Amino acid sequence: MAKVELVMPKMGESIMEATILNWVKNVGDRIEEDETILEIATDKVDSEIPSPVDGVLVEVLRQVNDVVPVGEVIAILETEGEVQDTPSIPQQAEVPAPVEQKPAAEPTIESPVASPSVEKETVEVPFIPATTNQSNGTKIPTNNNGKFYSPLVRSIAKSEQVSLAELDAMHGSGKGGRVTKKDLLNYISQRSSPAAASVSNQMVQQKSNVSQSVAKPAVSPASSTQGSHEIIEMDRMRKMIADHMVMSKHTSPHVTSFVEADVTNLVSWRNSVKGGFMEKYGEKITFTPIFIEAVVKAIQDFPMINVSVDGTNIIKKKNINIGMATALPSGNLIVPVIKNANGFNLVGLTQQVNGLANKARNNKLKPEDIQDGTFTVTNVGTFGNVMGTPIINQPQVAILALGAIRKKPAVLETEHGDVIAIRQMMFLSLSYDHRVVDGFLGGSFLRKVADYLEAFDKSQTI
């Protein structure tokens, strides 16, 4: 017999822990490989953890509602046969942390303690997103009245200013009457009407009356008022973003370079083909995939921008995985990643950009969608900003900010002399880690991106 330790799987960048929602299997249950054992949640996704082997669940080490760090053992499975017969489990990417982390170790065999016929193996299970459990309201405590809400429901409620009393008064469509994401969004869409507001007030008042009849300690609010100020507690995702940004500034000496590019040809081409592009490919073409195409070409010219740092070693990445900073509905930021971006043409990049952006807007991103980035692009021009000085997304060493495209007078050199013309201009800014990227490399790479954008062939067909 062999014992296998299941650990909380590695997830996306900046995710260091997850909450156990529900144990689908009980101690003593026989489990087939890939069969769901338990359900977990982060602030980004609710997901299922499958069994990596055929066996029996013999011990549960962490309980429902426990917040478990990545890598901690959560259960023990017992399998038939020797340890070497255990199928290998695909490893996820390392999660960046403020301190140096060692690479994930291969499964190890520990010496038996009680019986020489029993061996133990530590196995990291793959993190598989749920198909039916996304934001299903499975148990996460938010108060002391016995009702539970998923992290996603709580996040939406905070961002939409839905009070705890309103949540408690809802009758959810989920298992056991739990409030689901759909229930909450339906409630939010309706409560703006006078009738809905009246019903909401009645629900809250009824809930308040019931609460007053049962003596319970007061619940600390998410926000409070001090004099003329409102104090708002950060949600969990915002805390993680804050920690990650502080860690990045502490880790890397940031330098930012700027360049201005004439993107008139690029803009003219995109405006002329966007209708036909949609008709032919069923995709809306934005400027983002065109920018990413230029970035990929420049990385191929300057591969030392596509690296990370491990102590005194420089790790040169073979894959070009482009992260694109994206705003979530909650107002928080996430960076989905286009894997092997150099393998896509402009149509493929457009499909990748649109697909990941839609997933982000609908809270459908999977953990693998935000892993393994090697270089990040952020479009500050979306907000009308002409330039920015972004913070590096660790463990990468550079991040490119794209400013707003604006019509400006510019000097053009012609065969008849210099002329002033109205051109579509934009600023590009590159923040880079001065430990490994000097001004020559950083400036040359940035200029190369601009060159590719300025040299865009406006006669190309779709």
Image (tube, rainbow, N blue to C red):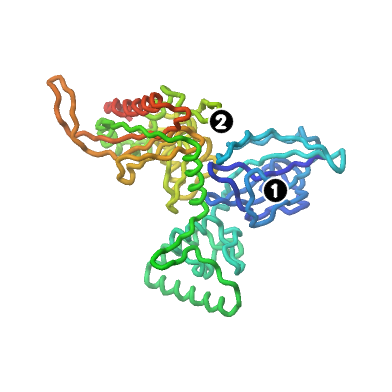
Q: Is residue 403 left or right of residue 124?
A: left
Q: Secondary structure at mark 1?
A: strand
- Quadrant for the C terminus in the image: top left
Q: Is residue 282 visible?
A: no
Q: Amino acid at mark 2?
A: Asp
- Quadrant for the N terminus in the image: top right
Q: Which residue is mark 2?
A: 310
Depth check, mark 2 against mark 1: the one in front is: 2
Q: Residues within 10 Å of mark 2 (few under 14, many from 20)?
A: few
Q: Image quadrant of residue 115? A: top right
Q: Amino acid at mark 1?
A: Ile
Label of residue 74 in the image: 1
Distance (Cα) linking label 2 and label 1: 30 Å
Q: Residue at x 63, y 53 (%)?
A: 67
Q: Is residue 262 above or below residue 45?
A: above
Q: Image quadrant of residue 282? A: top left
Frontmost residue, 117 versus 257: 257
Q: Is residue 146 left or right of residue 2?
A: left
